[in-house]
Structure formats: structure tokens, C-alpha cells
Amino acid sequence: MRDEKAKILENTLIAADTFRMVLQSSLCEDLKAGQFVNLLVPGFTLRRPISVSSFDKEAEEYTLLYKVLGEGTKKMSEMKAGDTVQVIGPLGNGFPIETAESVLLIGGGAGTGPLVQLAKELKEAGCRKIRVVLGFPTKADIYGVEEFSALGIRTHISTDDGTYGFHGNAVELIRAEGLTAEMAYTCGPKRMMQAVEGLFDRGYISLDIRMACGMGACMGCVVKDKADPDKYYRVCKEGPVFRIGQVDY
Amino acid sequence: MDERLHVSLPGLDMKNPVMPASGCFGFGREFAELYDLSLLGGVMMKAATAAPKFGNPTPRVAETPGGMLNAIGLQNPGVDAIIEREIPWLRQFDTCIIANVAGSAQEDYVETAEKIGRAEGVDAIELNISCPNVKEGGIAFGTDPKVASSLTAAVKEVSAVPVYVKLSPNVTDIVAIAKAVEAAGADGISMINTLMGMRLDLKTARPIIANKTGGLSGAAIKPVAVRMIYQVYEAVKIPIIGMGGITKAEDVLELMYAGASAVAVGTANFTDPYACPKIIEDLPKVMDQYRIGRIGDIVGKAHRV
């Protein structure tokens, strides 16, 4: 973990209220798929915890795909290439890369980001059958498809209003198309991940929760263990990735 | 070490007056990954309760203009685990250790204070009678002078180290509480805890914090801290550890002018994890700017000009 200035190489709109920010700084060398950084937006008290979508260690470049949800991310979206931004990272545990014949990656809305690096690493680890399911509210919200197709991975898209792809949500798409896999990785809205947990016994979820310090000190983002109510995890430190069935959220 | 920054309070001989505030620093482990905690004047540990405590449901935090709300609910592993695991670890650093003690009944406070006050390395106790986020105890002990006084006396009786009573700003007359705890034997006062606040979600109209209300902290509350420290300084003789909205070295001067003998930095640690060492580094420069020789000389200066 380090706190350093990162150079903004790109910050562009890629879908409705959704931006791609490419940063360059030395913390990149320690990044693992599924980890996040905590970004300082000048004028705001709390930092913005954003998952790293993908990285290139040689170039020390890492990409954040983020959605404008409030005033802080709005200000973040106005930052310009060439500027610098103060960033703490890498934070959190990241996705374990497991060996499986077939894997399903399920992203909902803003949860698509961290699945990109994961897909890349699963492929490198020899997983032959990786399929991606992404759910969005409407056609204008869709992003991430090029990132996966660049890896040679096909994306199944659903929209809640049927303006593109499957009419319904990501879980309904999985059921309708009869998609199966040995294991699943998912990141997105709570209800979607809970439904994914109902479909798969093996896999991982990545939680999104309000945080303050982002580094394990404040106890702002804890979740309980499902089996042992006296056991808890800090999402920012022991998470954000948990085994399917591990936590109550 | 800069002698100009040295301050001395009951039980606390500090190389500088700056400490991270309780609840904003855990037990220091995460920050120790970034800098040497021996730079700090002291560490005010996360609250300890007699039994382990999970705290409140999430969301527990929300941002506000110039600050944040929190309703953690005193989550901690319990006093025994803190004595066994956290304090021995923290002792490796050359810094004062202040143990924050909380509870839901007088017996809890007394038990926890007695145990933790005897733990090797603990220099003082901060008696938390002002947590706004727990259903039982906490703030209930800090809003009535009689109750505050009786608890302070009971804890003083068992504590092996000096006791600083942490006051709540959520009262009509903070001076009355300050006087009551002084009369009950408190060695010092720490102030202010958070101000009770609330935020609502625009889509659902529900509170953002699961506990509904939370404690407001951050730069936004600094003027309240300055005012209350100023009023309490005039009314009591015991020293004050000041906190509330400090983000930079200039803020340290302001709270000390008002009457604080040392200060704690809370929410600023979340904006910038290096906030404390940066403030300590900047202090001598800011003191030069305002022609201050020794930092200890400015305590309560606002009352002498």
C-alpha cells in the first residue's frame, strides 16, 4: 500500500455517466485483479474507492471504469489528462485466480470494471471456457464489451428495458440461455450477486459498500460471516472479494 | 525532536502535541504501514469495551459538506484482546498511549478502565462518555452532570493512570459537565466528540446511515470545537486535549489558543493518511510565521489578549 501522485493519462466518457480513467504510478507494480484504489478528489473529505479494471505493469498504467453517482465522482469526471491525482493503493484482497474448465463472469452496471483484469488472468491461467454476462439498465449504459472482445471473450448483454440484447436482468439471461459453468465470479448490485450465489456453489463475489478510510482502520465497511455471527470482515481489507456463501451482506 | 513542540500533561510527556483521535486510527496497524508511529505525540486508541462489540449495521458512514457522519457503534475486539494483542504491539513505538474506554453501564466502564489502566504501556485513559451512536450508555453518561460525575469518580477510583473525560458537544451547557467531571476528580478533559447529525437519500427519502443518525466530524465542526474549548478553559483548571476538525497545522494553533494543551486529529486521517505527520512537520514553520517560541506557551492565549 502506498499513497502517491498518479498521472492521469486519459479520462473519457465511455457510456452514460460512465468514464474510463487511465492512471500511471508506481503502485501499479503491486496490483492484483479485483483490488481497488482510494482516490482523493480535492474539496471532499472522503476518498473515492474505485476498483481497478485492468493494468499493464510494464507501462505502470492502470485503468478505472467508474460511474458518476454523486458530487465526488462528478468532480472526478472533470479531471483532465495530464493532471495528477492523489491515490492510495493497492487496497483490498483481490480475486483468487482458480483453475476451472469453465467460468462465468457476471457484472452488473458499475460492477463490470474489475472483471476485465480477472478475465485476462483466468485466460492466462489456462481457463478455456470463459463467458461474460453483463447486465445494464438500458442500451446507453452498456460498456466493457470491447475490453472483453479484445481478449477474445464473448459477452452476453442484458438490458432491463430490452433496448439491447436480452430483455431482463443478468441472472434471468443466465437462466434463459441455460449458461452453466464450474464456477462464477460476480460484481454488481447486491440483489444480483445474491441471485448469483443462489445459482452457483463455487465462486467469488466482490462487494461495493460505503467506506471511509479504505484501509482497515475505521470499521466503516464491515460485513458478518454467514456461518459465525461473531466473525466479521472489513470489506476494504479482508474484502472486497469473498467466497460465494461466505458473508452476510 | 524539536523541543519547541514538547508538551506535558498529566501522565503524558509528549514530544509534540499531535495525536490521532480515537476511532479514526484503529490501533495504528494500518497507518504503521505508511509511517513511523514514533513521530506522533501519542496515539488515542479505538474505544475498548468490557466485551467484544460488533457495532451497528451498515452503511455506517456518509460524507457531508466539509466532513462526514459515522455510526460505527464502538466496534472493538474487547478489552482483553486489546490488552493482549494491540497494546504490546503499539508499545514498540516511542509515543504516548491513551486508551479510550467505553461502556453501556457504569460497571462496564469501571471493569474496562481498571484492566486497561494496569496494562503496561498505557499512559492515560480517555473516558468516552460521549459516543452518540450506541443505544445504551455512551452519550447518556455525558449529558447529565450528575451521571458524568458519578462515573468519573468511580473510574478514577480504580484507574492506575490519569483519566481524561471525553465530552459530548450534544448538550446545552458543556461547561456544567466539564465542571462536574473536574469536581469528580478527572485529570483532564478531551473535547469534542462528534455532533449528532443525519443525511437522507434523495431517491428513497430514508436515512443514509443505517443507525439513522450519526456523529458529524471533520473541518465543518472546528468552529464548534474552538468555541466549546474556549468556554470550558475559562471554567476549569485541568488541561484539555482538543479535537474537532483539525486538518492543518494552523488549526492546531487555533484550538490551543482556545485552551487545548494538546490536540487530536480525527477525520483528516481519512482524507490524507499522512495528516498527522504532515501537521507535526508543518508546526514549527507555522509557529515561526506567528512568532511562537514554544508551543506550550500558546495554551489559552485567546484568554490573555
Image (cartoon, coloured by chain):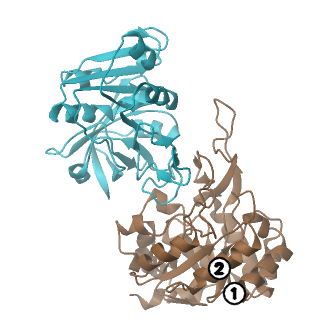
Horizontal relation, residue B101 to residue A21: left or right: right
Residue extending furthest toward the right: B146
| Residue B20 as seen in the image, left or right of residue B30 | right
The spot of residue A178 in percent (x, y) is: 36, 12
Q: CA distance from mark 2 to mark 1?
A: 7 Å
Q: Is label 2 in a helix, a strand or a loop?
A: helix
Badge 2 crowding class, 10 Å Cα cut-off, few under 14, some 14 to 19, many 20 or more, is: many
Inspect the image, locate mark 2, and give the three-letter code of the amino acid beneath it.
Answer: Ala
Q: According to the image, label 2 marks what residue?
A: B113
Above/below status of A3 relative to B82: above
Type of residue at label 1? Val
Q: Which residue is mark 1?
A: B158
Specify which label sits upstream in the sequence, 2 or 1: 2
Residue toward you, B291 or B115: B115
Please give the name of the residue rendered at 47% of the width and 73% of the height, measured from the top-left corner: B86
Where does the N terminus of chain A fall, quadrant-wise? bottom left
| Residue found at x 58% / y 72% | B79
**Circle 1 — which element?**
helix
Question: Would you say residue A219 is visible in this rendering?
Answer: yes
Q: What shade does chain B have?
A: brown
The x, y position of residue B22, in whole percent, is 57, 69
Colour of the chain lettered A: cyan
Cβ–Cβ below 8 Å for labels 2 and 1?
yes
